[in-house]
Image: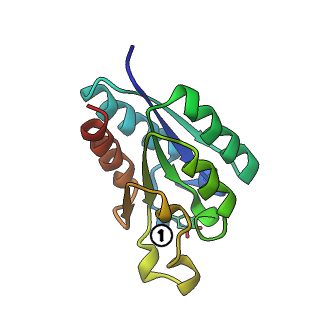
Amino acid sequence: MSKTVYILNGPNLNLLGKRQPEIYGHDTLEDVEANCRKVAGEFGLDCVLMQSNHEGQIIDWVHEAREKAAGIIINPAAFTHTSVAILDALNAFEGAVIEVHISNVHKRESFRHHSYVSLRADGVIAGLGVEGYALAMRRMGSLLA
Ligand code: DHK
């Protein structure tokens, strides 16, 4: 059975492609999913992309991943900078974790420079646009081989 990677997305990313395209680009989450699925296929992986504007829902998906996924690619969006609860959930997940930010958070406001999730992530990608997700999936391919 092929290994599954969860691709979890936090608040406002449902508007990807429409929201501040000068920062986040014109691609949608559907485009992200299609690109990730292509890369996952190259490595014999399966993937499921999910998005929620609610912190508890993201935590529930991380808990679900304990049983159903070998890796998590996560863009927690604004929760990156605020959520000890998502960090705690990820600390209870034993697989690989890669944190993705579409924008270069370090070039932006100082409140975006700190990430709770980075304390758990095995790797962090920032500022590579939506391509960051596909690159994270490629890395998952190596980590989960
Ligand atoms: C997305 C968001 O919505 C912001 O709150 C983060 C992140 C950055 C991104 O670059 O993907 O600060």
Does mark 1 have its CB less than 8 Å from ligand 1?
A: yes
In this rendering, position of residue 35 left or right of residue 108: left
Give the quarter of the figure containing the N terminus.
top left
Percent x, y of residue 145: 25, 31
Amino acid of disc 1: Ile
| Residue visible at 60% across and 71% down in the picture | 81
Percent x, y of residue 54: 74, 51
Ligand 1 image position (quadrant): bottom right
Residue 10, placed above or below residue 94: below
The residue most toward the bottom is 110
Residue 54 can be seen in this image: no
Residue 67, placed above or below residue 102: above
Residue 69, placed above or below residue 50: above
| Residue visible at 38% across and 31% down in the picture | 37
| Residue visible at 59% across and 54% down in the picture | 13
Picture colour scheme: rainbow
Percent x, y of residue 56: 75, 48
Q: Nearer the viewer, residue 34 or 106?
A: 106
Q: Quadrant of residue 109?
A: bottom right
Percent x, y of residue 49: 53, 37
In this rendering, position of residue 117 left or right of residue 41: right
Write down the residue under mark 1: 23
Circle 1 sits in a helix, a strand or a loop, which is it? helix
**How busy is the neighbourhood of tag 1: few (under 14 within 10 Å), some, or many (20 plus)?**
few
